[in-house]
Structure formats: C-alpha cells, structure tokens
Amino acid sequence: MRLDDISTPGRVADPDEGITGPELALAARNHGMPLEAMRYDLTPPGLHYLLIHYDIPYLDGRTWRLAVGGSVRRPRTLTLTALQRLPQRTVRVTMECAGNGRARLSPRPISQPWLVEAVGTAEWTGVPLRYVLAPSQVDPAAAEVVFTGADHGVERGVEQDYQRSLPLAEACDDDVLLAYAMNGLPLAPQHGYPLRLIAPGWYGMAHVKWLTSIDVVTEPFTGFQQAEAYRLRQEAGEPGAPVTRIVPRALVVPPGFPDFMSRARIVRPGPVPLAGRAWSGRSPVTAVEVSVDGGQSWMAAELDPPDGHRWAWRRWRLEWTAEPGSYVLTARATDAEGSQPTGQVWNRGGFANNAVQEIPVSCLAGP
Ligand SMILES: Nc1nc2c(c(=O)[nH]1)N[C@H]1C(S)=C(S)[C@@H](COP(=O)(O)O)O[C@H]1N2
Ligand SMILES: [Mo]
C-alpha cells in the first residue's frame, strides 16, 4: 500500500453535498472563536481559534532545542532559556486562518469547514527573529527563511513535517517574533509550545508552531505548504498565486439573542447597539460600513483609533434603531487597496474568502 492510497486527495463538494464525516472530524478538533468574544480586545484563554494540520506534538521545553542553520556561517542550537535571555518584544496580533469563510463558498472546497470564526487576537511575547539570525551570520545570497515544526503527517499523499518560509526581508521585520508566551503565559500545547513563529499581517499558515529548526535558503522554498497547499487556483493543476497577507474583514458581534439551532438572532424594537471588529494584514482599515438590508444601503460605523496596535483588530460601533421586521445585517471593511466583496471570489482551496458576512435578524416585540 502507498501513502496516497490512504491519504485523501483535495476535492470540491458536489452541488448538494453536505458537510462530510472527515470535515466534521476536523471541525471538532479545530474550533473557531465564538463571535461574541469579539467584545474583548484580547481573546480570552481557550476562545482563540485553533488550526492543527496533524497532531499536537508532545514537547518538553527542558530538552527541546531550536536548530538555526542552512546558508549561515555559524549554525547554532539554542535552548528555550537561551532564547528567553535575548531581547524581548510583545506584539498584539489578530491572527486569521486563510481558510476562514471556506464553508460559505459554493461549491465548497472540502477541508476544514470554517464559516467566519477562524480568528483571534493575542499578545505574543518572544525574541524578534533577526536577533536570532544575526549571530549566525546569514549568507549574503539568502532569499528566504524556512521554518519547520515538530508535527509530522501526510497530506494528499505527501509525507512531511509542517514547513513554511518567509522572504528574508519580511522575516527580519522587528515585529516578526519567535514567541514563547501568549498573553503573558507560556504557549499552550495547542498554540505551539514551546516556540512558534509570529508573522503579523500574514494568514495563520505562516505562523509555524512547535518550531524545531530555522533554515536560511538561497532559493525560493518549494515545500508542500508553500508550493502546493496555500495557492489561489481555479483549476487543480495550475501553479496559482501564493496566499500571503490577510485581506480586510469586518465581523459583527451577534446582536440580541440566538435561536439555539439556527443561531438566527432576535432583537427587540428600539435602539440596538451594533459593534464588531475589523482588520486587514495589508494596510490599516480606513472605514467600516454596516447594512441592515443585505448590502443595498450602507451606514458609516464609528471606528476606534488604532491605539498603536497596527496588527490588531479595531472595534467599530453603530447604533441602529430597529423596528419590527426581518433584516439581513452585514458589515464591510475597507483598507487602502479596497473593500470586502459582497459576493464570493471563489478558488479551489477556499482561501481568503472575505465576502461580507450575512446575519439574519428578526426584530420582535417582547413576550
Ligand atoms: N507546525 C504547525 N504550525 C502551524 C500549523 C500546523 O498545523 N502545524 N497550522 C497553521 C495554521 S493553518 C494556522 S491558521 C495557525 C493557527 O494558529 P493557532 O492554532 O494558534 O490559532 O497555525 C499555523 N501554524
Ligand atoms: Mo490556517
């Protein structure tokens, strides 16, 4: 038997195919952030979304080591204590999975079936990567830095360690961290203990967890997660453009109260405070607009100042006076490059789908 006999190929769901068993299994392991948690600037413990391709590796910070090598003059091995003695920096980052919005696409690419909740905000503490690279003396011909995690699996028949690269110039940004703490505590196992990469502004797949080695390379990295998985494609065989930075998105804290099964929202007539968060990894969000008629007319929301946290979501608010009836609530964010689309922009992997959220709301008088 070969690995590709047991490893599931990528595919797109048939027109009326519901969520499959393997998608349910993935969704039960990799949970989203309940949208009401957008009320907090920092996502409370356990509510940050999770995405783990294979298994959470079992690592002991006392015996764990980080290898720094590849095209460097001085390859080195560092302990966690040695990394913690280097200059420390804390950055507040909104992280979002590139697959966020995938399950809303039609046809649905079969993979982790995110609706819109694959997001969270944390304060990450660690050492800027450049302080770890500099003493190793990077080859002047270096192009990228490859990050390898301790987790191992098989994906579409390709057995691999989870690996991703960043261009060297991006990797040397002061805000790119080798992080050992999340919200002031050692990383939890599911978030990458003992050390993970934080690449602010990039979709989640770039933030490699459970780091074991960092390798400087002189040619663009062609590993599976770089050249195969995270590409924007219409057809299976084409090379596709790489998935990189987070495109803008605004989400609404669900107003009123929900119906248990449908999660449809119910509000009372009168003033309904609407609020939510907006972010973009390309350039700062410049505006948020809200619609209660499914995007036919838009109202400008009030956007909180950036507060020095370039990489974190920003709160927006708008007071809506609701009258009895049915509504479709939506919000859209704009950055320097444009606004969220109303309809889907489809690709085979289901990446970067930032089509505006649609929340059915019923305004009903009290019992
Ligand atoms: N080693 C390793 N790093 C990884 C992953 C993984 O499966 N293995 N998943 C990536 C993806 S796709 C995302 S979206 C983020 C999720 O980070 P979180 O689980 O801490 O929210 O981790 C990234 N880093
Ligand atoms: Mo992801």
Image (cartoon, rainbow, N blue to C red):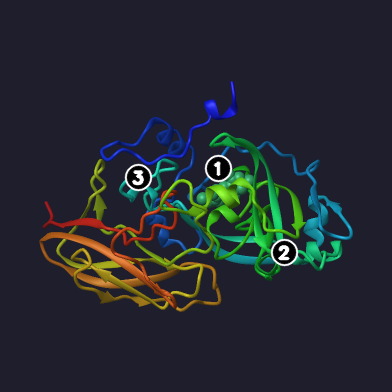
The type of residue carrying mark 1 is Ile
Q: Is mark 3 within 8 Å of ligand 2?
A: no
The residue that label 3 is drawn on is 108
- Closest to the camera, between mark 2 and mark 1, is 2
- Specify whether 22 is left or right of 105: right
Q: Is mark 1 within 8 Å of ligand 1?
A: yes
Give the residue displayed 21% in from the left and 55% down from the top.
360
- Closest to the camera, between mark 1 and mark 3, is 3
Looking at the image, tell me whether mark 3 or mark 2 is earlier in sequence order: 3
Kind of element beneath mark 3: loop
The type of residue carrying mark 2 is Ala
Q: Do tag 3 and tag 2 residues touch (Cβ < 8 Å)?
A: no
In the picture, the quarter occupied by the N terminus is top right
The residue that label 1 is drawn on is 52
Q: Is residue 158 above or below residue 79?
A: above
Q: Is mark 2 within 8 Å of ligand 1?
A: no
- Specify whether 347 is left or right of 222: left
The residue that label 2 is drawn on is 143
Inter-mark Cα distance, 2 to 1: 27 Å
Mark drawn on residue 179? none
**Neighbour class for label 2 at 10 Å: few (<14), some, many (≥20)?**
some
Looking at the image, tell me whether mark 1 or mark 3 is earlier in sequence order: 1
**Neighbour class for label 3 at 10 Å: few (<14), some, many (≥20)?**
many
- Specify whether 361 is left or right of 235: left
